Amino acid sequence: MKQDKIGKMAGIVVGVLGAMVLALPLFAQKDFNMEERKTVENFKRATPFYLDAAKQFAKDNLDKAEKKLLEALAIMPEHADAYYLMAQIQLKRKEFSQALASITAAEKNYATIAKFHTFTHQQYLDQLRQQRQGLQEQLDQIRERLSQMPASSQGRSDYEKSTQAITRTIQQIDTRLNSPIPPTFEIPAGYFYIHGNVLYRLGMLVDAAAQYQEAIRIDPNLGNAYNNLALVSFSLGKYQEALDCLLRAEAAGVKINPDFRRALEAKIPPK
């Protein structure tokens, strides 16, 4: 199973949360009641430990990262991002039952810190536009491949189905972009992706597939989720679905295992 690109993720996390910590005093003054202000203070105190843990995790120093996360959680037991990172550490250690408990706690507690992560409506629209651009690039790549394939090519229909699926997703994003109503905040796609990885390792394939599908719904450019969903679908005997997902993963820039692709194509009868 492919894991997240740890260095890149940690850099994003450190940058975003570092800005949040600086902004917290203003939040505390304007937007929260007394109980929420206490939560804000705990978040502000715990987050530096979490950020240190993210840096150690990026260097693959799992023990040091875990120690920092435990310090963060001792200050703020509801720190969802700390649980999220802890789940990734446990996943790397193959401590799958513990990882499942951690990612479940991350999702359960996310609402507590949602105010600290909420995008403005303009930021949300910018994110949607970036997703649309990525999908359009995928679509262009697949169409380019189609233009080079003979009309009678065996795999042509699979690529055509992929173009239809991507086009539908772009249309859904266009609908959101044209909606004047600001969105409600959602748990990030990465949470569901890691949850899917844990369930896959535990052999809970149907549940893992549901997690990957939710990750893809939130972020349709999450190529690794498509790739892992292809593996799950293959294991469940859903070979056409697996191939569709593999094509989407490839279009999103994921390096595909050629042996897996050949094994998958061998399962699908010629049309």
Image (cartoon, rainbow, N blue to C red):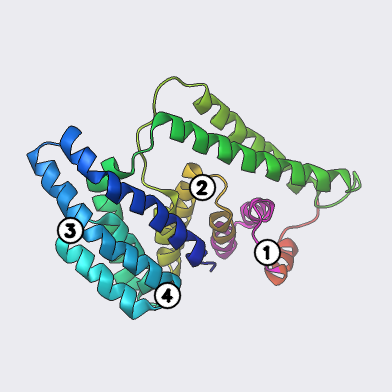
Badge number at residue 76: 3
Residue matched to label 1: 256
Give amino acid for label 2.
Ile
Instruction: Name the front one of labels 3 and 2.
Output: 3
Give, as a single range, the part of the protein colored magenta.
Answer: 229-257
Please provide percent x and percent y for residue 239.
64, 57
Residue matched to label 4: 92
User: How far apart in space, not on screen, are marks 4 and 2 (Cα)?
Assistant: 22 Å
Q: Give left or right: position of 54 versus 271.
A: left
| Quadrant in which residue 160 is drawn | top right
User: How far apart in space, not on screen, are marks 1 and 4 (Cα)?
Assistant: 21 Å
Does 6 appear in magenta? no
Q: Give the mark, 1 or 4, whose residue is nearer the N terminus.
A: 4
Q: Give the mark, 3 or 4, whose residue is nearer the N terminus.
A: 3
User: How far apart in space, not on screen, are marks 3 and 4 (Cα)?
Assistant: 24 Å
Name the residue: 24% across, 56% down: 79
Please provide percent x and percent y for residue 220.
55, 44
